[in-house]
Image: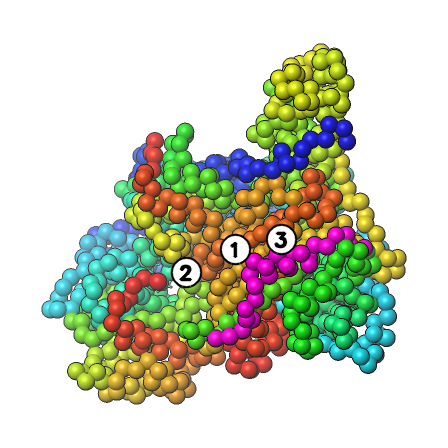
């Protein structure tokens, strides 16, 4: 069985075991290692990607369900020159630590800010229910995101 | 894996799905909904070499329809989609809350109502007690035909379901009354609840309780109704403190389970307070079931 | 030093240079490195806690599809350890913990390696496991290490015996006489704490190859030189045959301060002739984590009428698990933490690391300091209650100050804790410590003090000046997430050389390039590697200025380094660019480089006070004052933190934002330890929390912004007066929350973690947890 989809804007087809998780395939087959395997069970969000525009934990998505899907991973966010606004805010607020959770944080929050341009802190925290960070204690991440709240430039993303 | 040894199917009709599910060779076949339970099988130490029969391409399982004042919900409707589809009717506030507060945003977008009902061994579902409180029925289809039964009956037989059977739809009766859904967590959000109380109450003009259904989840190994508490509170005014005291008085009815997350003792301790919280929600005039 | 640079030049909010790649998913951690050419290994681990292995037959696995190599005990018979060499990397004839490695298998795919592991035949003769401290210390307890007497002792001087792996003692003054006085109040308390899993997002992981007769090991570690040493020891090869390289590390928190998976991958690489990757699954990480240990603490104090502590006795039992590991070393830290903070007339402290048939424990951010501070501060509040003294007044009166003698007799310098306490209380005056909130919940507030240390010790650094005026800093330091390698070190080097930190290249750790180093941990990176880097810079400056003085026809004393130039002091624009000085040097003396080194200066204790200690006195103490307010629900036992405040002794803050990050992150990790993170061990000796469903770390909704003040100016040996700032924020979190919860509930909080269920139990008055739930 072959599964065809677009990955970061490029057509791809996959003919391995369709029960394999998207995460495994991204990391091992396509060597896109931005999505991390941390829990493998939907709690941590380190494997967050976007499937047809919506954030999904790649560790729980079997390849066979992806026929015709539009997939975007952290590697497909921002351009070579420019970070997206969420990424830039994280740089500006100096919030990154070990960095393992950040690809997932960026995926979740970029989507969230697009739909909720003026969130409260509590809204941001709810949005992060499925994104764990062991290093930062979260609040600096939220400070950074709140700086985008109601920003002149709404959060869209620069795409290649 | 050979060419003929297909491990993943994407049937477009229920009949086709059932026919694949019935021919289980060379390995067992299972329906795949959101996958959020199935994909963790290895972590539960279960056999993972099964044929996946994805229900994603079966259009009729994705719809939500108005049927005679009630709702018929396809098994593949996600928690998020259901939360959005349920209107502001107070009778649906509990289910809406169950859909909108369970798990986390990404999971809610994928996990389905059918999966929530069919995950065998899942002791802490949110949707199940909310559906029990609503008096929902489920439709099951097998090659031999179709049956419709109340959730409680379905749960009783869940462990021994035939492989070739699909839960296709969930039916909600026309909304009547007010509902609430209270979850006890050890953190703010993002974890399986250690106890859930879901309530639907209908009141007379004099504010006494005419109809009442109270369902529990996570407390015992499977969700259940708490009939003794319902009976005790029927025909009395909705009063959170009285409901709490009545729950406290009947806590012996239950056999709360010991788990890694909490002991049975602790679940029993929480329940009266949780009942009180649910009843306070019922009597609160403001918007109900807003996501946590 | 002549031409001393202005230390304030090093102070800035330098952003992290690794942030962009980390935010784009481009950073390749060790777990991301294994390409298609690499073999994948899995460990076959014991499924029992205590047994004699009667049969271990790998032959069925050897011929399976994809399998390239298998190793067992015979391939690496050496023992390693800290203090005592008691730890084989594979169980030989005896299994001592659930999860202990029996064999390791490399195959072309992970699935093949797993199938092969399933095919290995293992037969056991079960022995009843010793799972708790009580069981291990019972008079008739089975010995976890029957052959303990035969182990090589690597650090002499401690008492050992039976299931006691190590004993450290402090005896200063006559405590018996003090307790016998009739004018003292005696206060006593017993505390117990559970384990904490680091949950570093990157698991322990390694990739090894064997080329030119040497092992090349790329690994997720905090301590490359320790890995080098241990791999060599257990494989019985010279240390020079092992090279360790460390890419970005996805979190450590102490978990990676010891050697872990590296020897297995190394053996397989040699056997197979291929590059081998070995990565712990999350389940393995959960079940064999070198946790912060569970422990039991007993403490007793005699207080005189003035509220002085005339004597203190304490005993601490630390569960080291099946092998001694870091706990052997950490017995030392009781003296400086549980017997720290306060002036003591006399002290008698006994700390024992105890063997059990449970997964070995290890080091975790501020280690036993965290629970010793919990026990000490709870005990201190009990003392205040017993003698009727205000807890701030008592602390203010008794905290260690300038010239005071510590538990082991060392003399402390400077008044630090007292002014820090004043700063906290001035900012947040205490109105009440307990009460009821309008919503019905119980309110509590508490203020605690804590003492930790900077783990100094050997570091080496080389600084090479490059032709373009940039500098390359070569050390064995590792970037584990704290940012030290990205911020403090380039800031220090840049300030020393008068260049911008962006012009300082920081080489990632490679033991073939950098000199020996103790590792990144114990808050030591800024201090030890920073000091070695400063020393290297001094040599570079010397060489630079000599060449420049010749060119500018002046003497070196008249020159300063600034803005990438050498200038005559006080005459901006008078000098020349570094580039031209470097070019001139290449023609005359050759390229400019400097090397520097640092080690512990060895502060002294009173002779005879401490036995079995690895560090008798602490070179750089670090102090912290924390304060918090909580609201406790009486039924559910849930504790909401209403405010959390920190005053932290940082010596000198080089990068305030970086320290803020560490304080927010460290306090939140402490909140998890104090309130929700629970590790239980079942009757089979296996950890019950096998993943993130059951192991509850704080999520975004559970935290709050931490209010903080940096206390600068306390004495420090660190470069530019710095102290490490990353480890200590976790130190008194459990202490503060426990004291606040005790104030709120009026109950004696004696156990960690204070899960909602435990608090509810406490309030309900049932003695449901008198010992840690390890059964
Ligand atoms: C991190 C996380 C947190 C969660 N938290 C919560 C929570 O707080 N509350 C809560 O209620 N849920 C929660 N869940 C969801 C829950 O645990 C289940 O994963 C989910 O409900 C299963 O739905 P699914 O559609 O993904 O089912 P799948 O994984 O696709 O299937 C589950 C089971 O049902 C069977 N099945 C599915 N659909 C049908 C059908 N139509 N007919 C017959 N059999 C079928 C499958 O064969 C399988 O055995 C959480 C999940 C995760 C991953
Ligand atoms: S790895 Fe997918 S959610 Fe944690
Ligand atoms: S930065 Fe390390 S997990 Fe978030």
**Would you call the spot at circle 3 few (<14 residues within 10 Å), some (14-19), or many (20 or more)?**
many
In the image shown, does C349 or C199 lie closer to the viewer? C349
> Does any portion of residue B69 appear in the rendered image?
yes
Vertical order, C542 against C328 (above or below): above
Residue C253 counted in the magenta span? no
Task: Name the quarter where the C terminus of chain A is drawn.
Answer: top left
**Would you call the spot at circle 2 few (<14 residues within 10 Å), some (14-19), or many (20 or more)?**
many
For this orientation, the residue located farthest to the right is C607
Estimate the spatial distance between the alpha carbons at disc 1 and disc 2, rounded to whole Å. 22 Å
**Would you call the spot at circle 1 few (<14 residues within 10 Å), some (14-19), or many (20 or more)?**
some
| Colour scheme | rainbow
The magenta stretch spans which residues? C411-436
Q: Which residue corresponds to mark 1? A: C706
Q: Secondary structure at mark 3?
A: strand
In the image shown, does A36 or B244 lie closer to the viewer? B244
Q: Which residue corresponds to mark 2? A: B190
* Cβ of mark 2 under 8 A from ligand 1: yes
Residue B80: image tag: none
- Chain for numbered disc 1: C
Residue at image point 25% right, 81% down: B212
Q: Are marks 1 and 2 in contact (CB under 8 Å)?
A: no
Residue at image point 80% right, 79% down: C183
Q: Which residue corresponds to mark 3? A: C648
Estimate the spatial distance between the alpha carbons at disc 3 and disc 1, rounded to whole Å. 12 Å
Q: Nearer the viewer, mark 2 or mark 3?
A: 3
Q: Are marks 2 and 3 in contact (CB under 8 Å)?
A: no
Q: Position of residue C522 (x, y in %)?
A: 67, 50
In the image shown, does A130 or C628 lie closer to the viewer? C628
């Amino acid at each position: 069985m072959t599964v065809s989809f677009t990955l970061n804007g490029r057509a791809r087809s996959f003919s391995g075991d369709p029960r394999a998780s998207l995460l495994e395939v991204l990391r091992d087959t396509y060597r896109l290692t931005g999505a991390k395997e941390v829990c493998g069970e939907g709690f941590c969000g380190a494997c967050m990607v976007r499937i047809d525009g919506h954030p999904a934990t790649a560790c729980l998505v079997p390849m066979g369900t992806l026929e015709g899907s539009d997939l975007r991973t952290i590697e497909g966010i921002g351009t070579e020159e420019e970070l997206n606004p969420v990424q830039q805010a994280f740089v500006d607020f100096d919030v990154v630590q070990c960095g393992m959770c950040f690809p997932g944080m960026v995926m979740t929050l970029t989507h969230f800010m697009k739909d909720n341009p003026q969130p409260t802190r509590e809204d941001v925290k709810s949005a992060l229910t499925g994104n764990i960070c062991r290093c930062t204690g979260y609040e600096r991440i939220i400070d950074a995101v709140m700086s985008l709240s109601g920003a002149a430039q709404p959060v869209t993303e620069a795409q290649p | 894996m050979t060419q003929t040894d297909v491990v993943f199917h994407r049937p477009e009709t229920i009949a086709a799905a059932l026919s694949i599910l019935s021919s289980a060779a060379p390995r067992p076949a299972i329906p795949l909904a959101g996958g959020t339970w199935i994909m963790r099988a290895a972590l539960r130490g279960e056999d993972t070499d099964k044929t996946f029969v994805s229900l994603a391409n079966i259009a009729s399982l994705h719809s939500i329809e108005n049927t005679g004042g009630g709702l018929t919900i396809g098994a593949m409707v996600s928690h998020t989609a259901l939360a959005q589809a349920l209107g502001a009717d107070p009778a649906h506030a509990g289910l809406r809350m169950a859909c909108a507060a369970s798990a986390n945003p990404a999971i809610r977008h994928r996990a389905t109502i059918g999966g929530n009902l069919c995950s065998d061994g899942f002791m802490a579902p949110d949707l199940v007690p909310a559906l029990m409180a609503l008096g929902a029925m489920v439709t099951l289809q097998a090659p031999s035909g179709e049956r419709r039964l109340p959730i409680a009956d379905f749960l009783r037989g869940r462990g021994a379901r035939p492989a070739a059977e699909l839960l296709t739809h969930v039916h909600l009766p026309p909304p009547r009354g007010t509902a609430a859904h209270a979850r006890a967590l050890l953190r703010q959000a993002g974890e399986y609840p250690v106890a859930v109380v879901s309530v639907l109450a209908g009141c007379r003009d004099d504010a006494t309780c005419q109809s009442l259904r109270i369902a529990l989840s996570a407390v015992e190994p499977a969700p259940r109704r708490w009939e003794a508490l319902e009976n005790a509170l029927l025909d009395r005014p909705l009063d959170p403190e009285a409901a709490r005291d009545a729950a406290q008085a009947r806590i012996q009815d239950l056999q709360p389970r010991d788990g890694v997350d909490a002991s049975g003792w602790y679940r029993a301790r929480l329940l009266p307070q949780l009942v009180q919280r649910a009843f306070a929600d019922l009597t609160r005039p403001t918007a109900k079931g807003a996501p946590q | 030093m002549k031409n001393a640079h202005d230390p304030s030049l090093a102070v800035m909010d330098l952003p992290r240079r690794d942030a962009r790649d980390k935010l784009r998913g481009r950073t390749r951690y060790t777990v991301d490195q294994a390409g298609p050419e690499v073999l994948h290994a899995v460990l076959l681990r014991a499924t029992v806690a205590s047994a004699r292995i009667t049969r271990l037959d790998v032959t069925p696995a050897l011929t399976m599809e994809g399998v390239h190599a298998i190793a067992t005990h015979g391939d690496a018979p050496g023992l390693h350890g800290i203090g005592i060499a008691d730890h084989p990397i594979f169980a030989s004839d005896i299994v001592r913990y659930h999860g202990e490695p029996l064999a390791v298998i490399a195959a072309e795919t992970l699935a093949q390696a797993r199938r092969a592991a399933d095919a290995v035949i293992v037969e056991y003769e079960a022995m009843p496991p010793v799972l708790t401290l009580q069981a291990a210390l019972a008079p008739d307890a089975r010995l976890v290490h029957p052959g303990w007497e035969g182990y090589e002792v690597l650090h002499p001087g401690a008492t050992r015996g039976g299931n006691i792996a190590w004993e450290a003692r402090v005896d200063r003054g006559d405590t018996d006489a003090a307790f016998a006085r009739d004018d003292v109040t005696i206060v006593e308390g017993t505390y117990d704490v559970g384990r904490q899993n680091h949950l570093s997002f990157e698991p322990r992981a390694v990739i090894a190859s064997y080329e030119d007769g040497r092992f090349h090991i790329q690994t997720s570690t905090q301590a490359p030189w320790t890995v080098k040493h241990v791999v060599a020891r257990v494989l019985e090869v010279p240390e020079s045959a092992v090279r360790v390289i460390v890419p970005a590390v996805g979190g450590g928190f102490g978990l990676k301060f010891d050697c872990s998976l590296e020897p297995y991958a190394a053996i397989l690489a040699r056997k197979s002739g291929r590059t081998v990757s070995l990565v712990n699954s999350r389940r393995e990480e959960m079940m064999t984590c070198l946790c912060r240990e569970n422990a039991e603490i007993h403490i007793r104090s005699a207080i005189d009428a003035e509220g002085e502590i005339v004597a203190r006795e304490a005993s601490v039992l630390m569960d080291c698990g099946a092998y001694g590991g870091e706990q052997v070393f950490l017995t030392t830290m009781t003296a400086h933490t549980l017997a720290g903070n306060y002036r003591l007339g006399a002290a008698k402290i006994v700390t024992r690391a105890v063997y059990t048939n449970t997964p070995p424990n290890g080091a975790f951010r501020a280690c036993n300091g965290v629970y010793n501070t919990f026990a000490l501060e709870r005990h201190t509040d009990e003392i205040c209650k017993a003698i009727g003294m205000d807890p701030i007044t008592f602390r203010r009166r008794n905290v260690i100050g300038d010239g005071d003698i510590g538990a082991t007799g060392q003399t402390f310098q400077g008044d630090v804790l007292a002014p820090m306490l004043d700063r906290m209380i001035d900012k947040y005056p205490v109105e009440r410590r307990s009460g009821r909130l309008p919503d019905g919940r119980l309110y509590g507030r508490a203020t605690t003090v804590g003492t930790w240390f900077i783990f100094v010790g050997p570091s080496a650094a080389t600084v090479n000046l490059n032709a373009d005026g940039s500098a390359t800093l070569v050390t064995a330091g590792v970037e584990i997430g704290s940012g030290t390698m990205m911020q403090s070190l380039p800031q220090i080097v840049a300030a020393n050389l008068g260049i911008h930190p962006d012009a300082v290249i920081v080489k990632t750790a490679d033991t073939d390039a950098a000199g020996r180093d103790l590792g990144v941990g114990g808050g030591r990176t800024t201090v030890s590697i920073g000091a070695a880097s400063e020393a290297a810079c001094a040599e570079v400056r010397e060489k630079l200025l000599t060449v420049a003085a010749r060119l500018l026809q002046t003497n070196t004393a008249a020159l300063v380094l600034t803005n990438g130039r050498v200038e005559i002091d006080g005459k901006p624009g008078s000098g020349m660019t570094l580039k031209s000085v470097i070019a001139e040097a290449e023609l005359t003396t050759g390229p400019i480089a400097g090397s520097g080194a640092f080690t512990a200066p060895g502060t002294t204790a009173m002779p005879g006070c401490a036995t079995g200690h690895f560090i008798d006195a602490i070179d750089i103490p670090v102090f912290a004052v924390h304060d918090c307010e909580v609201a406790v629900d009486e039924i559910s036992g849930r504790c909401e933190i209403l405010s959390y405040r920190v005053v932290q002794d940082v010596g000198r803050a080089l990068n305030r934002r970086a320290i803020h990050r560490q304080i927010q992150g460290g306090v939140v990790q402490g909140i998890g330890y104090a309130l929700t993170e629970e590790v239980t061990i079942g009757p089979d000796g296996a950890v019950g929390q096998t993943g993130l469903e059951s192991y509850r770390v704080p999520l975004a909704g559970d935290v709050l912004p931490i209010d903080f003040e940096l206390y600068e100016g306390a004495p420090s040996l660190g470069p530019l007066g710095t102290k490490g700032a990353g480890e200590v924020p976790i130190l008194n979190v459990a202490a503060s929350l426990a004291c606040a919860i005790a104030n709120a509930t009026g109950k004696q909080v004696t156990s960690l973690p204070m899960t909602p269920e435990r608090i509810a139990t406490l309030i309900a008055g049932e003695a449901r947890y008198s010992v840690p739930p390890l059964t």
